[in-house]
């Protein structure tokens, strides 16, 4: 019987990424730096929405991977501080990568650009359907489902609206998916690297 924890996922992704990083380190003179970045970051991004709600200790082993990839891409020493390197590459932390993925899933779901099962999970705060509105429907806020446990807050039906409602209203009102992603990336890079 499988456990309902993210530990196995984090360990599996870390193992695979470290394997690829060791091989790429041997071939770094022959491989383009974009290939290194894409290979590692795509592996980290695979199913990373499951780590959006857990305690802060879960993304820590995964955060070592983009740090190591940045060292390899930029040719840095092991003792180099990584925040300026990640800022230079316009990468943000694993935690914010997971939040970005949930925000884009919410945007696509609310614009009916994904399968029906994902769009039916989340609803917007409509003044016609909800009698007691705490927020006006012009802000395009999602309805938060009440939860009793910390574990249930990790579900997409709860974590998605929570992240969506934490975005500024002007970002939530963006219709175009490309512009939404671009604005979210800019916001998260600014938050990650302390530019706000």
Image (spheres, helix red, strand yellow):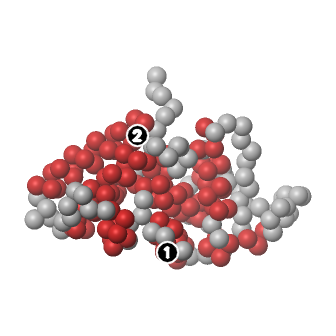
* Closer to the camera in the image, 3 or 53: 53
Res 9 label: 2
Residue under label 1: 195
Count of labels in the image:
2
Considering only vertical position in the picture, is 139 above or below 48?
Answer: below
Compared across the picture, whether 9 is left or right of 182 comes to left
Q: Secondary structure at mark 1?
A: loop
In the image, what residue occupies the spot 67% across and 36% down? 149
Q: Are marks 1 and 2 in contact (CB under 8 Å)?
A: no
Residue 11 x/y as whole percent: 35, 39
Front: mark 1 or 2: 1
Residue 92 x/y as whole percent: 42, 64
In the image, what residue occupies the spot 49% across and 70% down? 194
* Closer to the camera in the image, 131 or 166: 166
Considering only vertical position in the picture, is 188 above or below 59?
Answer: below
Compared across the picture, whether 9 is left or right of 165 comes to left
Considering only vertical position in the picture, is 90 above or below 64?
Answer: below
Compared across the picture, whether 61 is left or right of 30 comes to right
Q: Secondary structure at mark 2?
A: helix
**Residue 78: quarter of image:** bottom left
CA–CA distance in space, label 1 to label 2: 32 Å
Quarter placement of the C terminus: bottom right
In the image, what residue occupies the spot 43% across and 55% down? 94
């Amino acid at each position: 019987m499988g456990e309902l924890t993210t530990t196995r996922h984090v360990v599996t992704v870390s193992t695979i990424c470290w394997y690829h990083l060791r091989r790429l380190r041997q071939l770094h003179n022959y491989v383009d730096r974009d290939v290194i970045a894409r290979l590692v970051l795509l592996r980290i991004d695979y199913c990373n929405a499951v780590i959006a709600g857990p305690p802060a200790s879960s993304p820590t082993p995964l955060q070592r991977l983009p740090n190591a990839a940045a060292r390899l891409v930029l040719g840095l020493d092991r003792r180099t501080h990584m925040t300026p390197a990640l800022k230079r590459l316009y990468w943000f932390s694993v935690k914010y990568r997971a939040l970005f993925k949930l925000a884009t899933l919410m945007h696509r779901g609310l614009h009916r650009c994904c399968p029906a099962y994902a769009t039916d999970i989340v609803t917007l705060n409509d003044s016609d359907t909800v009698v007691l509105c705490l927020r006006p429907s012009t802000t395009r806020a999602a309805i938060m489902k009440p939860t009793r446990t910390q574990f249930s807050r990790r579900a997409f039906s709860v974590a998605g609206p929570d992240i969506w409602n934490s975005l500024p209203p002007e970002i939530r009102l963006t219709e175009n998916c490309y512009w939404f992603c671009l604005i979210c990336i800019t916001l998260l890079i600014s938050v990650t690297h302390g530019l706000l």
